[in-house]
Amino acid sequence: MKIKHEAIWRELPIAGLIPEGGTAQEYKTGDWRSRRPIWDKEKCKSCLFCWVYCPDSSVLIQDKKMIGIDYDHCKGCGICSQICPPKIGAISMVDEG
């Protein structure tokens, strides 16, 4: 069963069944958030705690260094800002919009 991106709720599978794997990248869920993380590149030491704890895999890494945040998929939970070492404070949360 293939789910259309514009499917209405009546067309969705019963009980939240996910009919095929690997579809998370197809759905941009970042517009759900009410707060967004702001990353300060100058303060960041690339400890990667934010990457380890992000439940949405929204912390972008390249060559073992943080390079940004995927706002298309970040839901604004704030875990990244809470786990960032306090002495560094490279990630802060701000109200969306």
Image (cartoon, rainbow, N blue to C red):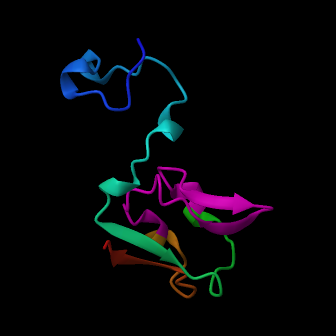
Quarter occupied by residue 41: bottom right
Does 94 sit left or right of 26 as displayed? Answer: left
Pick whichever, 14 or 55, lies toward us. 14
Residue 93 lies, with reference to residue 76, above or below; the image says below
Residue 14 lies, with reference to residue 50, above or below; the image says above
Residue in view at x 48 percent, y 60 percent: 71
Residue in view at x 21 percent, y 27 percent: 9
Pick whichever, 53 or 5, lies toward us. 5
Q: Position of residue 81 (x, y in %)?
A: 46, 72
Q: Is residue 54 magenta?
A: yes
* Residue situated furthest left in the rendering: 10
Q: Is residue 65 magenta?
A: yes
Quarter occupied by residue 77: bottom left
Q: Position of residue 67 (x, y in %)?
A: 67, 68
* Residue situated furthest front in the rendering: 6
Q: Position of residue 93 (x, y in %)?
A: 39, 76
Pick whichever, 18 or 79, lies toward us. 18
Residue in view at x 59 percent, y 65 percent: 49
Does 92 sit left or right of 43 as displayed? Answer: left
Residue in view at x 38 percent, y 31 percent: 5
Does 37 sit left or right of 9 as displayed? Answer: right
Q: Position of residue 39 (x, y in %)?
A: 54, 77
* Residue situated furthest top in the rendering: 1
Magenta-drawn segment: 51-80
In which quadrant of the rendered image does the C terminus lie? bottom left
